Image (cartoon, rainbow, N blue to C red):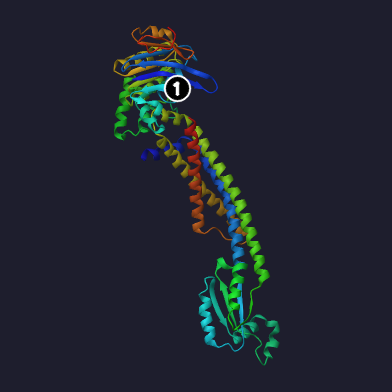
Amino acid sequence: MIRFHDVTKEYPKTGAALRRVSLHVKKGEFAFLTGHSGAGKSTALKLVYLADRPTSGEVRVSGFATARMAPSEVPRLRRRLGIVFQDFQLLEDRTAEENVAFALEVTGARRASIGPRVMRVLTQVGLAGKARQNPRELSGGEQQRVAIARALVNDPVVLLADEPTGNLDERATRGIFQLLRDINAAGTAVLMATHDLDLVRSLPGAHLLELQDGEVVFDSAGDGAAAGGHP
Amino acid sequence: MSLVLRETANAFRRAPLLSALSVTTIAFSLFVFGLFGLVAVNIGRAIGAVAERVEVVAYLKRGTPIEAITVALADIDAFPEVERVAHVTEEEALARARQDLTEFQDIFQDLEVNPLPASLDVRLKPPYRDAEHVAEVASRLRSFSFVDDVRYGRDWVEKLDRLRNIAGAVGAVVGAAFALVAIIIIGTTIRMAVLQRSREIAIMRLVGATDRFIRAPFLLEGLVKGALGGALALGLSFAAWAVIDAALLRSVFFTPLQAAAGVVAGALLGLLGSALSVGRHLKGV
């Protein structure tokens, strides 16, 4: 599903953000990417959704070999991913419903199919009753649910979540985390970057990947994918 | 396509102030360019009116047979530079002189023989009314055996030429400067619109919209803003012209074709400005 092979990412100003990282997130899996801020979690996710390209090594996502991918092919890959951020990234001048529909409209979905699909995901995240509200009228947790609905509406094979609970209080955090688990239970792989170790501990069966200074220092899959890292 | 139209309409609806501001900015930068255009058009027309009087006159020897003149008329009329050629007989020349030069009425009355020669008056087509072509036509006329002398006011035609060159050079330089300023202002204005929606663009890219899809509403927006700005600038130019024409000096406005070209140019500038701004933005994300 997502496979890093000996991936290094260097930035001209700040140096290496990832060093010789190898990892494998399997289909349908719930995987955590943990580590302190600056450990390389966001960079790793960016390489998955191709906001950045690796300096060396290979990243494969859902059958796409990203290294040789033409820029015009990138949208095709992104349509198979759902992406959620700490700051929700919602358009504040549109309602919840319009925010979700936006993802379908701009990827050329059939007009008639948009309404039902939007309602289905809004129901899935528990916000069917607030479809007509603007993000500003919603709580942080609700805004993140809208963002998750938008990420889900294109039926992604994997949901990437970069600190999705970072801006939320404890109660909202638990709600969002439960929602991500439900989504995973329904078959979608989830790769979640977080530094909230309580969440990680609450899901003992999950695949755990720990980054430190750009290197994988722990991989619960233990299948040798972390070769090159510390023992 | 309907989505592109909707998104474009949304851009105006969601940011009416910014949209109005950019249309106004575009309008005023094109208005300045339009005023300059009016000046250029009127100077050109004034020069053209003067050039209208450029005429080459070939005086004929006395006793030239009319058959020779008829053949020559056809030959001269076939010159590519010639708009029309007229044969003025000795009698017509005298009648014209009597009419035009009333202060010499008495002298003309007392004449026993007509001292005025017959002539061929040649008018050139507008693009050939300059010193070089006039001299060229004059020398060709001189080669007819029955032509005595050719006159065309060499000094005057050369001065006209110089005036035309100066007006052309100044017009090109000032016009290019104004056009450049207009392009920069329009580009900046549209860049503001792009930046204002950078979040939207970022989200579009994340969910997998193609660059072409992202670009389309902006291009249409730039086109519409440019056209609106152009139309507004045309209105402002017309108002300014009407005031000047009524109060200061008689002048002409753009022809409908020139006016339409101005609005189309505005639209194209808007499109170009958008294409550059969005292109740069998409590359940067």
**Position of residue A187 in the picture relative to residue B152 (left or right):** left
Q: Using the image, name the chain to which the residue with label 1 belongs.
A: A
User: Is residue B201 positioned above or below B123 on the image?
Assistant: above
Q: Residue placed at 43% from the left, 8% from the top? A: A197
Which percent across, then down, holds residue B152? 64, 74
Vertical position of residue B32 compared to residue A208: above or below:
below
- Return the x and y of residue B6 as percentages of the image width and height: 39, 38
Expressed as whole percent of the image width and height from the top left, the position of residue B232 reads 52, 48
In the rendered image, residue A189, in percent from the top left (x then y), is placed at 33, 18
Q: Nearer the viewer, residue A43 or A177?
A: A43
Specify the quadrant that holds the N terminus of chain B.
top left
Residue at image point 61% right, 55% down: B171
Residue B52 can be seen, yes or no: no
Which of the 4 image quadrants contains residue B215? top left
The reply, left or right, for residue A30 in relation to residue B138 is left
Q: Is residue A4 visible?
A: yes
Residue nearer the viewer, B20 or B206: B206
What residue is at 62 percent from the left and 68 percent from the top?
B131
**To which residue does mark 1 refer?**
A56
Q: Nearer the viewer, residue A82 or A215?
A: A215
Instruction: Choose between B21 and A179: the one closer to the eye.
Output: A179
Instruction: Return the residue found at the far bottom.
Output: B112
Q: Residues within 10 Å of mark 1 (few under 14, many from 20)?
A: some
